[in-house]
Image (cartoon, rainbow, N blue to C red):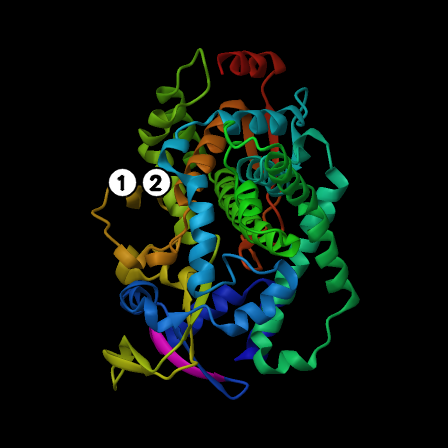
Amino acid sequence: MLYRSYPHLQSGSYLQLAWSRFKETGHTFTFYQLGTEKILTIDPENIKAVLSTQFSDFALGNERAEHFEPFIGHGIFTADGEAWQRSRQLVRPCFRTDDLSGLARFEEHVVNLLVGLPRDREAKVDLQELFLHLTIDIASEFLLGQSKSLLKGKNIEQGKSFATAFRRSQEAMLRYFALGRLSDLVPRSKQEIEDKAVMREFVTPFVTRAMEAKNDRSASNLDDLPAPAYTFASRLAETTTDFDAISGNLLNILLAGRDTTASLLSSMFFVLSRNPNICERLKMEVSETVDVNCGLPTLEQLRSMPYLKACINECLRLYPPVPRNSRTAVRDTTLPRGGGPDGTQPLGVPKGTQVGYQIFSMHRRRDIFGEDAEDFIPERWINRSLRPGWGYLPFNGGPRICLGQQFAINQASYVTVRLLQHFESLHAADEKPWTEDLGLSCSLKHGVRVFVRVKSEANLQKDARCG
């Protein structure tokens, strides 16, 4: 399986290969990789068992920590047990529901993106690159306390170096993870060591600032003063003085805050630039919902646009930002289905067995989403009595469900509306198909290259005054 998969990982066709395998063999199958038994499934009942009803039978596993932590350190995406619970408790206050209603934090960054685009002509741009800058600017402000301001042209070289190092490190993590026991025979390359240093340097100012703020308060006995605004970085500094521990946790959370939302936005505008009918219908819904004299949408308005929500759902279905994942059995257990002659009986899962679940493939099952399951059709979320349950899982499920899912949806919805308000024209600059660039999350191998014409600076300033 490993040798068959590697060329597809390189060419950007691994997810389609996996989907073809499921269509040939069924929704759950067992295979051997380098002598180790593994299970792959796209059965919602099995995934529900792994992530929820039998949660205590499974964990991320030691292999993930061994292969990921040398790159991104110890944090919420490598931890199990009490360490995971502590990390989750620290990040949870960042996503309190009463903090999610304010959209003003997004607007400055959207304006920075728009200001950087030409207004006197139709311009060719790669929106994926801009979305990666946008999401790191927002995530660094929201989670770490200060924006990197990449869209303003600040720290731009460092930002590009970080993006390159982050992507290469994800590819290396997956490579070592796939090799399993053989990975011990592969020495870490000079490039991997340099990339780790680049990523650490990127978060160092946030760690230093949080630790200095904590030390200043302690030295001055200012406990009676109001606490600084809650950020993940500030809370980490309150719980540990270990610089590496704080750095690792910040890199872990940036992985979620940057890559996944950028992936969703990139897929959205990939689709809109190639489907003018969908784009025009969405533009019409926006113009009919948002005040024409003040273009800033409210949270209530975003939630009142069914076609916008349907487009978001359909992007998350066809192009899930995290298209595959896995857990490892910590004791002898079973899955509800996959055993017996017809695959309907329970399947034994020995301790130590890795169970992979493929969201990309499950979201293409015709018995869940209809005969047109491989087509982008937002209307399926509006005109049909669609109830996929655990068959639709863009943000994971169970106790480890993504804490930032509503933040990501709000951010993607807001950015989509604001860009459509300012894009007078939008169409694809090439005919290349959606092709995966698979790391821990999934981006587009060829970017999102489009031609856009942006409306005048005067209109942008008018919108800003409304805010």
Q: How would you rate the neighbour count of disc 2 (Cα within 10 Å): few for under 14, some for 14-19, many for 20 or more?
A: some
Query: Disc 2 designates what residue?
Result: 310
Q: Residue at x 55, y 86 (%)?
A: 34
In which quadrant of the rendered view does residue 150 lie?
top right
The outermost residue toward the left is: 385
Is 26 a magenta residue? yes
Query: Disc 1 designates what residue?
Result: 382
> In this image, 379 relative to 181: left or right?
left
Q: Position of residue 219 (x, y in %)?
A: 63, 36
| Residues drawn in magenta | 25-32
Q: Amino acid at mark 1?
A: Ile
For the residues labelled 2 and 1, say whether their Cβ atoms are less than 8 Å apart: yes
Q: Position of residue 414 (x, y in %)?
A: 45, 31
Question: Closest to the observer: 211 or 89?
Answer: 211
Question: Closest to the observer: 204 or 435?
Answer: 204
Q: How would you rate the neighbour count of disc 1 (Cα within 10 Å): few for under 14, some for 14-19, many for 20 or more?
A: few
Question: Closest to the observer: 370 or 161?
Answer: 161
